[in-house]
Image: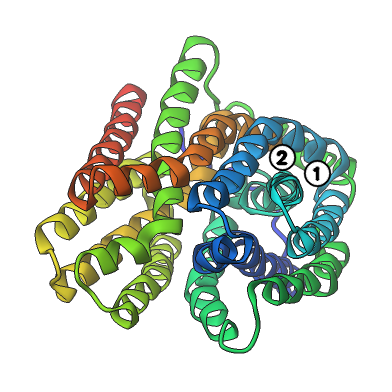
Amino acid sequence: MSSLSLPIPAPTGGRGLALITALGVTQVAGYGGLYYTFAVLAPKMTESFGWSPEWTYGGFAAGLLTGGLIAPVAGRLIDHYGTRLMMTLGSVLAGLSLLGLAEARGPVGYFAAMIALEIVSTLVLYDAAFTALAQARGPGARRAISQLTLIGGFASTLFWPLTTALLNSFDWRDIYRIYAVVQIALCAPLHLLLLPGPIHRTESAVPSADAADASQVRYLEGNDRRSAFALLALAFSLQGFVVSAMSVHMLTMLQGLGLSAAVAVGIGAMVGPSQVAGRLIEMLFGTSIDPVTTAWTSAALMPVGFVLLTIGGSAAGLAGLFAIAYGISMGLSSIVRGTVPLKLFGPAGYGAMLGKLSAPGLAVKAAAPLLFAMLLERAGLMPSTLLLVALSGLAAAAMYTLARKLR
């Protein structure tokens, strides 16, 4: 298969930098406020509502499941109306959903707010942002995607310590109110002012370049396309379970190994810089490497990291190596999620394609926090960690199988 090297004119100068910077800021605020914050606030939410943890994680799971079902629809809306309108609307709705969560007083209000939050998340997080870059730059968006995820990798690094610090002065409801204001007052204006306009404006540019180089680039069709889609969906789903479980339970697992709360938070915070390091390397040197090769090699790092965690016990050094390997793998997987479908399937209908690929993964991610919490409680830490080794290993195998098929 030929490489995606279409000479699509990319935004240059301040406009190109402004687009990536704006999306980077909104992705950090989006993932931080809508996703990573929950891991820190979940125990306080459980205590405040006076119910068992299963209810807290169950609401999170219900939201992720609904978001997974909605993702293909969200992708089609973004393709049709453009990212400026949909991501601006998504930021406003995300802020309102956070306010609704802050005001929830019982299971009905809590579940409704969590479901609304995860539905609107499909309009503002990576899939939508990748579509914005594809609409702006066509098949030449790989480098821009790498640059965006480089910035987005700081979300957990910033928001875990920030949310922990805010808990010293505010309760969980006030913290969600603060993050709601960030979505409405910061993210929505950035999306409105700097994102690509209506879809027809970008479509007029992309097809002309596509047509000029149609003889040089071929995208997968027929059985090859279906096979590649199935392998990608499987790998993304398995990785989604692992990442979703760890985003909520990493600190609990590290403390269960015998590490202090402060050390666990420190090691957890290493994941973000490791994501950034992996993405920086990919941005600087990865353009000469096939995206599918990057996909399976980075996926292989994740089970290696969990093996280190398994054999390390309470050793902070090996736990740190786990955080580095896991962070690099997780960071590169975010790039892979945008670049591999772009190479294999092309920019036409890109938003809808990402939505279809994300749907099964989001459904699996929905079950991960609750199922993993139950597994930790009933089976213990070691069997739970071995499950993560197995699932991440299967994801790497699926990516490697895809690479072999493409050869």
Helix, strand or loop for disc 2: helix
Whole-angstrom CA distance, mark 2 to mark 1, is: 7 Å
Residue 70 falls left or right of residue 184: left
Instruction: Identify the residue shown where x is 79% and y is 37%.
Output: 79
Q: Is residue 213 visible?
A: no
Going by the numbered disc 2, the residue's amino acid type is Ala
Quarter residue 251 falls in: bottom left
The residue carrying mark 1 is 205
Instruction: Identify the residue shown where x is 74% and y is 65%.
Output: 102
Q: Nearest the camera: 37 or 215?
A: 37
**Image vertical order of residue 297 relative to residue 310, above or below:** above
Asked if the residue under mark 1 is in contact with the one under mark 2, i.e. CB atoms within 8 Å, the reply is yes
Which image quarter is the C terminus in? top left
Q: Position of residue 300 (x, y in %)?
A: 25, 46
Instruction: Identify the residue shown where x is 62% and y is 89%.
Output: 169
Q: Nearest the camera: 73 or 343?
A: 73
The residue carrying mark 2 is 209
Going by the numbered disc 1, the residue's amino acid type is Ala
Which image quarter is the N terminus in? top left
How many other residues sit within 10 Å of disc 1, few (<14), some (14-19) or many (≥20)?
Answer: some
**Image vertical order of residue 93 relative to residue 226, above or below:** below
Residue 276 falls left or right of residue 317: right
Residue occupying the far top of the picture: 223
**Image vertical order of residue 56 relative to residue 115, above or below:** below
Residue occupying the far front of the picture: 50
